[in-house]
Image: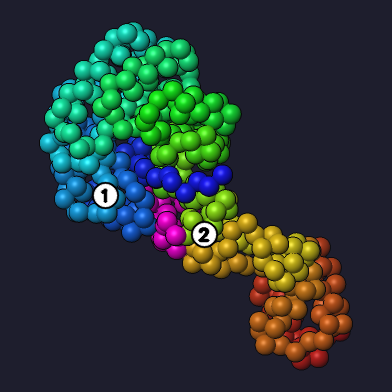
Amino acid sequence: MPLDRYFIIESTLREGEQFVGAQFTREQKIRIAQALDEFGVEYLELTSPLASPASLADLKTIVGLGLRARILTHIRCHKDDAAVALETGVDGIDVVIGTSSQLRRFSHGKSIDEIIDLASEVLTWIRSQAPDIELRFSTEDSFRSEEKDLLRVYLAVDRLGVVNRLGIADTVGIATPSQVARLVGTLRRLTHCDIEFHGHNDSGCAVANAFMALEAGATHIDTSVLGIGERNGITSLGGFIARMATYDRAATRAKYRLERLRDIELMVADMVGVDIPFNNCITGFSAFTHKAGIHAKAILNAPETYEALDPTDFGLTRYISIAHRLTGWNAVKARAEQLGLQLDDDRVKALTRHIKALADEKPLALDDVDEMLRMWANGHHG
Ligand code: HCA
Ligand code: CU
């Protein structure tokens, strides 16, 4: 199935601001917005202007930058919030209200009927004030809400004919891919709107769930850089890009400036005081490092044998680790060639046996292997 018509709603400046380490200054928000815009995300979602005076001023500033990405803000289902949001000049408003019994009891205290009435009033009012604005309605905690409640709310909102998009949110990160597919598929069948998926990563499914949502017909996916957000966050931009690039490399390369990803992640990691995890998709330090001799041999012949992604698409390089007991002579030979050393295959094989025996005794570094390669090339050993 071609998945070429989807949009990224990059929420580092909204959900990402809810990460414990995040406290972006205006200047930082501008840098993040510009970098993501250059990367090519279609939307930037920013914190509600009601959150604080700086949130309001910063939102106006970002709107004023004239970026290619459309600027959205995220508000509660309140007319007063909507009025402030409208004044900022944003391209779109994301309205959210909780529908699970937990949120209805412990957060806003409303029944499903009251939610429908309120949503109808607020959404219709926003549309009357701003005929061209992009309007999204989402339920919070969609996957712990009763399906019959959810459908009543979404169908009522769809029938208003005033929203562009319906959002579903896996607020606590418990949805399974098949649950996501089912809910998206149902909304696809029963409503006329675009569909957005917002998924938290508490049980490690945020990227898989986002992909599943697209397969089931969703049009918009929420991400944040490194996945930062409440708790352990949401679908990460890089993880989602890795997912899409392995699925359709050409389309993903055409849509986004992939070589910018690493710098964007480094910038945000620095701003929020974290490191890029070693096993991060694409940019983790070992993401393109090959170790076992059998892998190394195949990688040297044809990298795609053991690489689903091409590091050069992301401005990165692969690395073959050779200073260990799992090494193989093809990799050692390739290193000799890299260093411009002359060793025939028999000597390389003998040296490889020597490296393996040594590595059984103590940890080796690449420098150690290089040193041995030079000595063996000069005939000092073997
Ligand atoms: C939250 C709300 C939200 C909203 C998602 C959305 C969630 O911060 O708790 O509007 O699509 O995860 O439910 O981020
Ligand atoms: Cu969220």
Q: Position of residue 356 (x, y in %)?
A: 82, 68
| Residue 369 found in image quarter | bottom right
Of all residues, the one furthest to the bottom in this rendering is 378
User: Magenta stretch: dominant SS?
Assistant: helix
**Callout 2: few (<14), some (14-19), or many (20+) C-alpha neighbours within 10 Å?**
few
What amino acid is at disc 2?
Ala
Instruction: Give yes or no for residue 270 being in the magenta stretch.
Output: yes
- The quarter of the rendered structure image containing the C terminus is bottom right
Q: Which residues are magenta?
A: 254-276
The residue labelled by disc 2 is 250
Image position of 162 (left or right of 174): left
Instruction: Give yes or no for residue 112 being in the magenta stretch.
Output: no
Image point (30%, 14%), residue name: 116
The residue labelled by disc 1 is 29
Q: Position of residue 376 (x, y in %)?
A: 78, 85
**Callout 1: few (<14), some (14-19), or many (20+) C-alpha neighbours within 10 Å?**
many
Q: Position of residue 9 (x, y in %)?
A: 36, 42
